[in-house]
Image: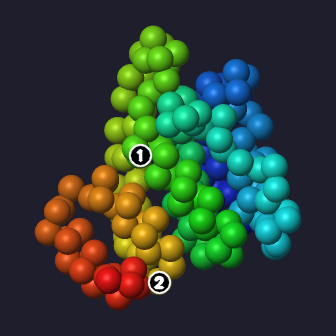
Amino acid sequence: MKAWEWELRRHDWAALRCGCGRGAGHLPTTFERLLGATAPDRTVGHTFAGHLEEQSMLFEAAPHAVPVILAGLAERPPDFVRGPLLSTLGFLVTGESHRSEAAAGRPGLEEECAESVREGLWQLYAEAADGHTEAALDILEYVDPDEERFAFHRARCAGRLGK
């Protein structure tokens, strides 16, 4: 069993609110389909839009998804999987709690997501160095509290960005 599978099983997804209006119990299947995909056509229809976030508005399941995404990225999945995972991660750290979440007492889901990403900071730095550089740096710019470290790594990655 892979680390992302363990992390996925840590949570009671059905008890978490999802953007689609039902419990998030269906999200493990989405993770399994994406992270187990062997070809791009195997990912069609498996997305987190409208579930973890909708137009940058976050739902309760979002912070629980972050460690699953980071563990999945550590497995170095194919580009057609890594790109969407990083995009989702970007939405999760730059979004804000949906008004329904704020009313339910969860007004800071974006900070919960960012804090969770900080626990896997080096996974994103590895991605920046040898992967989806720009997407990883965009996320790191929001979450790394060490501005000097971020500036150093951004400068090191400048060649990968064509600058």
Taking 27 as reference, is 72 left or right?
A: left
Image height check: is 69 above or below 59? below
Count the marks.
Answer: 2
Residue 35, given in percent of the width and then of the height, sits at 71, 63
In the image shown, does 108 or 163 lie closer to the viewer?
163
Q: Which residue is mark 1?
A: 93
Residue ID at (55%, 29%):
59
Tell me the element at label 2.
loop
In the image shown, does 4 or 148 lie closer to the viewer?
148
Residue ID at (77%, 37%):
26
Residue 49, given in percent of the width and then of the height, sits at 65, 41
Q: Which residue is mark 2?
A: 130
How much space separates mark 1 and mark 2, taking CA atoms?
A: 22 Å
Report the residue that reaches farthest toward the bottom. Answer: 159
- Going by the numbered disc 2, the residue's amino acid type is Asp
Residue ID at (50%, 37%):
56
